[in-house]
Image: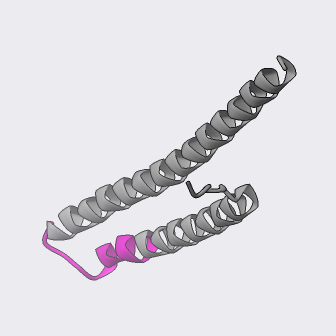
Amino acid sequence: MASIEFDFDRAKNFQGKLDTTMESVIDELNKMEKKVSRCREWWKGGSEEGFISNFSKTKKTIDKKLRDCAKEYKKLVDEVRKNKEQEEKDMKTALNQF
């Protein structure tokens, strides 16, 4: 039976990249939101407010999904870590019984 080893350093490295990328996307969305809100200066008639509102709602949804994804990844890695630690503890206990 093949053994699968979880690489915690690699998982932590990926988590850092995920966080950095997420923050970059959020920063870009914030910049875009500022540009979108400036359409009030030239777009007249009322529909610009719907456009701005829709963009803001979409941005908030994307922000939340990105943060949820990063949070879930961290949670899963923590669960793997806890399971591995428990497995090692159980194995040590079993070996000490001999």
**Along the line of sight, the residue nearer the viewer: 44 or 5:** 5
**Along the line of sight, the residue nearer the viewer: 35 or 15:** 15
Give the vertical position of 98 relative to 29 (above or below): above
In the rendered image, residue 45, in percent from the top left (x then y), is placed at: 13, 72
Q: Quadrant of the N terminus?
A: bottom right
Left or right, 27 with reference to 36: right
Q: Looking at the image, which residue sits at the far front?
A: 98
**Along the line of sight, the residue nearer the viewer: 75 or 60:** 75
Give the vertical position of 96 relative to 68 (above or below): above
Q: Looking at the image, which residue sits at the far top?
A: 97
Residue 5 belongs to the span the image colors magenta? no
Quadrant of the image occupied by residue 58: bottom left
Main secondary structure of the magenta stretch: helix
Q: Which residue does the image show at 50% across and 46% down from the upper left? A: 72
Magenta region, residue range: 34-46
In the rendered image, residue 62, in percent from the top left (x then y), is placed at: 38, 59
Q: Which residue does the image show at 70% across and 64% down from the upper left? A: 10
Left or right, 5 with reference to 27: right
Q: Quadrant of the C terminus?
A: top right
Left or right, 55 with reference to 97: left
Quadrant of the image occupied by residue 39: bottom left
Residue 36 belongs to the span the image colors magenta? yes
Quadrant of the image occupied by residue 56: bottom left
**Along the line of sight, the residue nearer the viewer: 6 or 36:** 6
For the image, the number of numbered tags is 0
In the rendered image, residue 28, in percent from the top left (x then y), is placed at: 51, 74
Colour setting: one colour
